[in-house]
Image (spheres, rainbow, N blue to C red):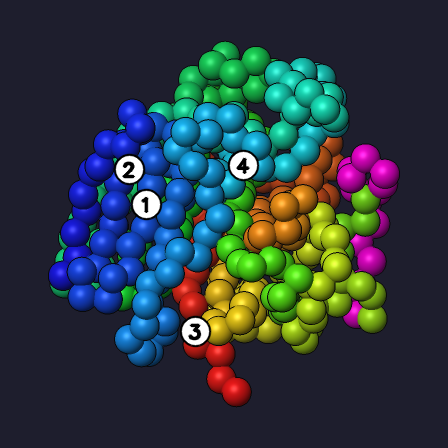
Amino acid sequence: MFSIDAEARDGIQILWLTDAASGSRAGVLPAVGATLWSLALQTVGEASNCDELLAGDPLSQINDNPWFRGRILFPFNDRIPEGRYRFGDRTYQLAINDRESGDAIHGMVHNQPFQVVDSQVDPDFARVVLRFGFDEGRFPGYPFAAELDVGYTLTRDRLEIAFTARNSGGRVCPVAVGMHPYVRTQPAVDAAALRCPSEAWVEVDERLLPTGALPATTGTPFDFEAFRSLSHRELDIGLLRGYAAERSQTAAAVTEVRRQTDTVVIEQDARGFPYTQLFIPPDRGSIAVEPITAATNSFNDGRLGLRVLAPGEEFEARYAVSRRANRE
């Protein structure tokens, strides 16, 4: 039996999507950027314990937001150097929210209140859709009107997240969308292995900004066509995966994080999310697997996946999370 329930904890509302039969559940924070705060899923095809899959911030630290765990990235993802970009014939200056680098990172909605615009409970799923929209002038340096819908759909052993980005203003606007889930890898990421097939990696300079080159991943340290151990690996890299839209009937680009007893599977629609950003944080207790519509700094290099929407135009992107048992 599926349900949607609200819980207040530490002054923050958690919206729980739950399947009582399997124990699967997802916790979303509407007032904090529609953050995916918690996710526990039954193993695909069999009864199992529903352990927490994601590494999230304690609610007492949720507003400190040290690593953007579970956050939604919009209307840009990742990094814009010094918060400055050029669109059309004008240069714009965004607010700087990463003091260490002096850059603007991860958009402007990660701490904004989303509104629930639709919910549905069915014998086979629970779904909630949240929306955040803003008018021209709401955010310094982004004088455009836009709207983002985020839909969470929980089934017995799977969570699907669907995004619809929309130009709600009267002039063209640049947009990119991403999400920042961290897969928990207790006791440490060093005991995990990663499979993440891709065609190219986004070459970056010492500031982690793209050089414009997209070298092939085959035979490089970023070749994850087969499982590779994450022991002693440092990762903060973008991978181009749009090939999946041509090679697969489902157009799914699949990332697998193999842990001690199970494997977490992230399937992103490569037509909407042609890139994946991989990041291992300093505590080495998780790995971020970020579906993104564009590579970092796409606002300054439209070749890296930037979407330019006409008034009223929208686009969709989606991905899903599941887990399966490891077989000997």
Q: On the image, numbered disc 3 is attached to which residue?
A: 324
Please report contact status of discs 1 and 3: CB closer than 8 Å, yes or no.
Answer: no
SS for dot 1? strand
Q: On the image, numbered disc 1 is attached to which residue?
A: 27
Residue lying at 56% horizontally and 59% vertically, measured from the top left: 187
Identify the amino acid type marked 2: Ile
Residue lying at 16% horizontally and 52% vertically, measured from the top left: 3
Residue lying at 62% horizontally and 21% vertically, measured from the top left: 97
Rendering coords of residue 267 (x, y %): 49, 63
Identify the amino acid type marked 4: Phe
CA neighbours of label 3 inside 10 A, class few (<14), some (14 to 19), many (20+): many
Q: Is residue 210 magenta?
A: yes
SS for dot 2? strand
Query: What label does residue 68 carry, if any?
Result: 4
Please report contact status of discs 1 and 2: CB closer than 8 Å, yes or no.
Answer: yes
Q: Is residue 278 visible?
A: yes
Location of residue 7 with respect to 122 vertically, above or below: above
Query: What label does residue 14 carry, if any?
Result: 2
SS for dot 3? strand
CA neighbours of label 2 inside 10 A, class few (<14), some (14 to 19), many (20+): many
Identify the amino acid type marked 1: Gly
Part of the protein shown in magenta:
205-218
